[in-house]
Amino acid sequence: MTTFTLVHVALSLVGIGSGFAVMLGFLSKKRLDGWTALFLASTVATSVTGFLFPFHRLMPSHIIGVISLLVLGIAIFARYARRIAGPWRSIYVVCAMVALYLNFFVGIVQAFMKVPGLKAMAPTQSEPPFAITQALVLLLFVVLSVIARKRFRNEPLSVGHPFVKVQPR
């Protein structure tokens, strides 16, 4: 594995890990500004570095990368430019959860391609173990996203710079 591949995989794992921290924040009505910044930055970096691998034709991974960058752009705009006010709060939560799901989805694809036991169960990724895994993960993300959107909707906003939490007087 090349150094570049290791960096890409590390960014992806940081994005997934910090994304789950952000998800837990949504579920517990907490913003977790530091985790959010790490999640958004590392997930953008994951998608961008994915386009730097050599390729000769458009692949499904490129389409997922474009979609991921689009939803991340909206999430970043909603979070920092619109400060998750009004409808931007729900837009932010949904876009962040979609970005996390897409990163996790690609992780599952890679696991089924690279982990010998998983590859043996679904060598072409059209077999039932792969489809069932992806369907269950999608269902879990949909359920968690709905709950996160409902719970985070009522989280009080802090005042001030988006990276510095200042308590209102």
Image: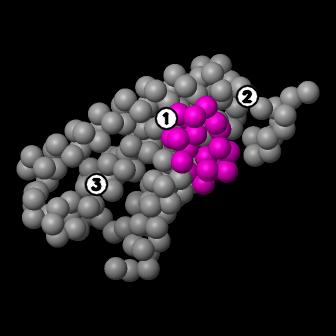
Q: Which of the two discs, 3 and 2, labels the residue nearer the N terminus?
A: 3
Q: Position of residue 102 (x, y in %)?
A: 37, 45
Disc ID at residue 108 = 3
Q: Amino acid at mark 1?
A: Cys
Q: Are marks 1 and 2 in contact (CB under 8 Å)?
A: no
Q: Are marks 3 and 2 in contact (CB under 8 Å)?
A: no
Image quarter of residue 120 = bottom left
Helix, strand or loop for disc 3: helix
Q: Amino acid at mark 2?
A: Leu
Report the magenta stretch's main SS. Answer: helix
Q: Position of residue 124 (x, y in %)?
A: 10, 57
Q: Is residue 71 magenta?
A: no
Query: From mark 1 to mark 2, how far is it between C-alphas?
Result: 19 Å
Query: From mark 3 to mark 2, how far is it between C-alphas?
Result: 35 Å
Q: Which residues are magenta?
A: 21-39
Helix, strand or loop for disc 2: loop
In the image, is 43 to the left or to the right of 64?
Answer: right
Figure check: 169 above or below 55: above
Query: Which residue is tagged 2?
Result: 157
Q: Which of the two discs, 3 and 1, labels the residue nearer the N terminus?
A: 1
Residue depth check, mark 1 versus mark 2: number of the one nearer the observer: 2
Nearer-the-camera pick, 99 or 64: 99
